[in-house]
Amino acid sequence: MTLLAPATTILLPAVGRAPVVPALAAVGPPRLLAGLDGAERLDRVAHLTRHGSPPDLSASELVALAEDTGLRGRGGAGFPFARKLSAVLDGRRRADGRAAVVVNGCEGEPSCLKDTALLLYAPHLVLDGALLAARALGAEEVAIGVTRADVARSVRRAIAERGPLSTPVRAQLLTERFVTGEGTALTDGLSRGPGLPSGRKVRSSERGLNGLPTLLSNTETYAQLAVAARLGALGFRTTGDPAEPGTVLLTVAGERVVEAPTGVPLARVLALCGPGPGQGVLIGGYHGTWLPPSAAATAVLTREALAAHGAVLGAGAVLALPEGTCPAGETVRVARWMAAESAGQCGPCVLGLPALADALGQAVSGGGQRALDAVRARMRTVERRGACSHPDGTARFVASALAAFPEEFTGHAHGAGCGRPVLGVLPVTSEEAYGPDSAPGTGGGRHAGGHTPTLASRPPAPNQRLLVDWTLCQGHGLCADLVPGMVRLGADGYPERATMPLPARMRRRAQLAVRRCPALALRIQDAT
């Protein structure tokens, strides 16, 4: 086991977040974090001294390397990287040989810091992987999306340290919110759009950055690719689980980034970083799954082993819940924050998630069995209906908490409470997101309901419009009844226009129209 000294760089605050400077640690010899035990940041010279120059690989060689190493995306879904590369190559052939590469460095969830750590401390390893892919694909550009100002400065400094590049590379600071890193939202933001999910199943390999076939993957994935290119498939497979070789980066307790071999026991990582599993361990962040202490004691960090517990590693967030805090109150707090992180463009997010968080708050404040039943009903109303996966993930988080802590929620709902305060150990970016009713230190394990923070606590967008997605619209006509005078139907029964300015006085009715549209074809969007 190797412990790495945390960086001591003083960082300027990013918008909406007091940035956490991640401490670093490793179980066994590190690869991605190698060299950082004696340096705060690896500049170009230190990077080359530690890692050497990467090889140049053709597209076929790069696909073969990804297949032979079993490399999967490290941003959440765990999609095989070789298949993603092959899909972009196919798209490139249909697009006259044009392509792009995008690095997703957006960590909208405060429990995730691994990509931040790489881009702050070892940015050249990420650039190596992105440029390796760009050269193999003949990409026109490499675009790196980030949401922290200090991370953007670090990446731009690394780009400047490289001098002239055959493939242009840029780092762009995007709006910080939970859904910024969603694939279509990221490519839209990097293409100078509003940075919102499209609401449609658009493969980046077919249409991504500026409409080009795009290789879009997570920061850690590109760093792993750079390591694999240097080590080769056999060298890469010398550590980790044979079915899933290599190392993985984890963010533990929202503040420490740990590099560990795949297949390492979760208990070993928890012992390195703290007192143990406590009341339970949340795996995969706020779209993830709670493991009870018994499962956390035996689980190992592989896809197959976690799947047996109904969990996925996702973006690598690991959050243990200590004994001294109230699980029910912590869940309410995060649910309210997740509702406030809505992009504000579809009914399940705009209305469904605040309603879910409010119902959960009412149940925890003693609302009885009827309130608990209302929570489950609210979860069903948002599932599989959103413009992106945020409503599904939030409902999954709440459902997992209800399953992991049934006695806690039942006791609170029936007025017994647990007597513990809400310590706020599950990090959120702003107290404004969940309101004073569930802030840390309320005591007694009882939490007030009836408060709907979310969008009402934010100033409304000054210029908005109502959009009709013609690929989804089926001509039901409900919108014309709900937003009279704004939406007019043509002779064919469909709205006459695809985009309409949204006056402030019509916002509530427009939200209702978005929610009621049977085809999910309506959306509210900030005007640009």
Image (tube, rainbow, N blue to C red):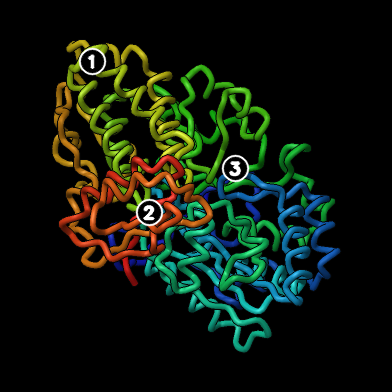
Q: Nearer the viewer, residue 179 or 493?
A: 493
Residue type indicated by callout 2 = Arg
Q: CA distance from mark 2 to mark 3?
A: 46 Å
Q: Are marks 2 and 3 in contact (CB under 8 Å)?
A: no
Residue labelled with disc 2: 523
Quadrant for the C terminus, please: bottom left
Is the residue 138 above or below the residue 477 in the image?
Answer: below
Residue type indicated by callout 3 = Val
| Number of residue marks | 3
**Among the two numbered marks 3 and 1 on one chain, the one whose residue lies closer to the N terminus:** 3
Is the residue 156 above or below the residue 289 in the image?
Answer: below
Q: CA distance from mark 2 to mark 1?
A: 35 Å
Query: Where residue 88 sits: x, y (%)?
Result: 72, 63
Taking the spot 81% from the left edge, 69% from the top edge, the residue there is 57
Check residue 27 in the rendering and tell me which mark sits there, or answer none. Answer: 3
**Marks 3, 1: nearer the viewer:** 1
Residue labelled with disc 1: 413
**Among the two numbered marks 2 and 3 on one chain, the one whose residue lies closer to the N terminus:** 3
Instruction: Answer left or right for 166 relative to 195.
Output: right
Asked if residue 50 shows in the view, the reply is: no
**Among the two numbered marks 2 and 1 on one chain, the one whose residue lies closer to the N terminus:** 1
Residue type indicated by callout 1 = Ala
Query: Where residue 352 sits: x, y (%)?
Result: 32, 37
Taking the spot 83% from the left edge, 70% from the top edge, the residue there is 58
Quadrant for the N terminus, please: top right
Instruction: Answer left or right for 282 relative to 42.
Output: left
Q: What secondary structure is found at the residue carrying circle 3? A: loop
Res 50 → quadrant: bottom right
